[in-house]
Image (cartoon, coloured by chain):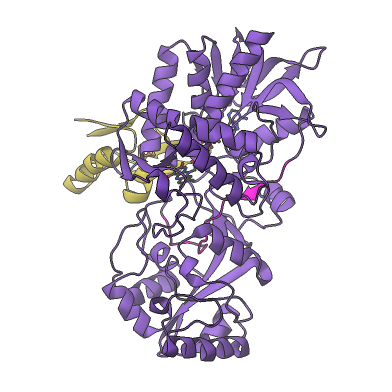
Chain colours: A yellow, B purple
Amino acid sequence: MKIEIKDYCIRCGICVGLYPELFAHNFEEDCIDVLKDPDTDELKQQARDAARDCAVTAIFLEK
Amino acid sequence: MNLTADIVIMGSGAAGYSAADAALQKGKTVVIFEKRPFQGGVANCAIQYIVVRNEKAYQDKAFHLLYEYGNYNGNPKVIRRYVDNSWRTREFIERLGVKMEVADAVPLEDLGAPERADGFPPAINVHGDDTHALGRGRGHGGALVGLYAMRDIIKRGGTYLLDTPLTDIKLDENGAVCEAIGVHNKTKEEVHVSCKAVIICAGGVQDDPEMIREHTGFTYTGKDAPNGGNVTFNCFPNTKQTGDGHKLAWKLGGAVGNISIEGHDMIPGPGIETSTAWITYNQFKIMTEQPYLWVNKRGERFFDESLSNNHISTCRGIRNQPDRVSYMIFDDDTRKHLEEKVDYFYFVFPAEKLTDVRGQFKDLIENWGNKHVFMADTLEEICAQAGISEEGLKKTIDRYNGFAASGVDEEFDKPAQYLRPVKKGPFYCMRIYCGGYNTIGGIRINGDMQVIKENFDPIPGLFAAGDNVLNELYGNPIIAGLGAAYFAMPLGFAAGDCASEYIDRL
Ligand SMILES: Cc1cc2nc3c(=O)[nH]c(=O)nc-3n(C[C@H](O)[C@H](O)[C@H](O)COP(=O)(O)OP(=O)(O)OC[C@H]3O[C@@H](n4cnc5c(N)ncnc54)[C@H](O)[C@@H]3O)c2cc1C
Ligand code: SF4
């Protein structure tokens, strides 16, 4: 599974705050970094939850 | 890159997109410069919109309430702009397809009623209907408004220049605005837009500690309060709100107005909120809402604590204390009470009761290393750790416990149900500072939303709206009323109208 973040992401940090294993603020580049491809069932579930929790539907998951 | 537009807008937040909408409605072309790589600004945080209905009697009453709220320091022409354009906020948000829910419809006869339990101050929250924009996921509706507004404005011919701060505005030989210049953050390409008007909607100064110190006298604690300080802000991290609009307006000769802290008392330091202001690690934000004993460093009470969920009166109280700091203290009986039922419910952090208060204190102190909360078996230890005068606190508590026993607060007339004695250890204490979501004010405008000089002459073609002018609504308190998207948007619509009318008159 791969995580893609669209450019209209508002850097609100909801994903970073709730799923720190997958997302981090990159203050230098002013963007959100995806830290890794979710490779376990638990991380895959977190990625799905993040897509659900995102404020603007900016998180997309590719199988 | 060279572009031409009737109106350039600095900032794509609440005031910016509203100004663009109004200008497009008047047939004008618009270019929006946005410093960040994405749309919406701080307005992406907003959920609650107070809306003054589009009825003359309602608007008139709201006008009087707001004017009175600022002790008649506000500019009544700007207040009028707000109340008369407020209904457009809801109309715009709904037009974009974001659902709005009226949480509290306030009928005309109830406007201005003093009693509210939801944390918003009298005469500021009761000038209209309490309406919530529904977001998706864990986000607030404001985030959808910012995104859908951008898509809508682009569809109607507007241009968004993202990641491109506006850095300069040129005046022609008559002193009128003729060009706006920005620079792309990454490519460093300059963008020149030849234009007839610029509307400054660049938000507050909360990320510029030097401006905060100079204009408010507060010292910014910084994220997680590493350097002391006595004011803390509560927003997304890294919002880069550095008063760029203020600096440009002032450079062009605009008068320097007061900058106020928006007013939202807070415990600084790590472990309180996640990177998103409304998702917290624990329930301390609810504890600081509660109406128990609050004291200053001298151990003295300083306000009627039944106002503790009114962030503005609380912050005004704190601001007037030594070192601008306060403490809330409760005992183990009150801890048990909180685990059965909180006295003040706050819709942003909803909970009917708290869980494991002791565990939460322990976690914050031991695991997060937060230096602003304390738990100890004796009041002496609390005083030593927190830096409160032991003699002063003991005197206060003796008297306060007497009030609790008699049910009469002879000092501040706090209602009996909130007079909970402080008797039985362990004791719990939180150091609470002033804070805010943002700052407001700093750019002076007239009733036609034009930026004015010290002598009140307008700078032709230069307009402003949003947080950076909001002190025109209240006058110049050090702790303001709310800086809000629901104020920024109506003023944005008004600025879009006024700039379009100015161009029509040229
Ligand atoms: C956590 C939180 C919750 C809030 N909740 C609510 C709420 O429920 N209801 C409510 O009404 N209000 C709420 N507010 C307040 C509200 O968000 C602000 O009052 C509102 O966003 C102000 O709008 P604005 O357009 O003046 O500024 P902003 O929305 O801050 O927009 C200013 C824009 O200008 C941009 N900018 C700055 N400098 C430049 C430059 N040089 N060039 C180009 N662009 C620039 C910024 O990047 C930003 O996008 C909340 C605020 C916070 C922090
Ligand atoms: S939750 Fe969505 S909008 Fe917010 S930072 Fe994450 S990806 Fe961006």
Residue lying at 42% horizontally and 69% vertically, measured from the top left: B290
Above or below: residue B240 compared with residue B159:
below
Which quadrant would residue B286 be assigned to in this image? bottom left
Residue B413 versus residue B16: which sits nearer the camera?
B413
Task: Give the left or right position of residue B336, taking residue B306 as reference.
Answer: left
Residue B235 versus residue B330: which sits nearer the camera?
B330
Dominant secondary-structure state across the stretch colored magenta = loop
Residue B383 in view? yes
Provide residue B474's location: percent of width, then percent of height: 62, 46
Residue B449 versus residue B21: which sits nearer the camera?
B449
Picture quarter with the N terminus of chain B: top right
Residue lying at 26% horizontally and 33% vertically, measured from the top left: A2
The stretch drawn in magenta includes residue B138: no
Q: How many marks?
A: 0
Above or below: residue B145 compared with residue B111:
above
Residue B42 in view? no
Residue B481 versus residue B428: which sits nearer the camera?
B481
Picture quarter with the C terminus of chain B: top right
Above or below: residue B416 compared with residue B468:
below
Which quadrant would residue B322 be assigned to in this image? bottom right
Provide residue B83's location: percent of width, then percent of height: 52, 35
The stretch drawn in magenta includes residue B272: yes
Task: Give the left or right position of residue B471, taking residue A10 as reference.
Answer: right
Query: Please, which residue is most extreme toward the left here?
Result: A41
Provide residue B327's location: percent of width, then percent of height: 54, 74
Q: Give, as a single range, the part of the protein colored magenta.
A: B257-273
Task: Give the left or right position of residue B66, taking residue B75 as reference.
Answer: left
Residue lying at 44% horizontally and 17% vertically, measured from the top left: B153
Provide residue B422's location: percent of width, then percent of height: 44, 86
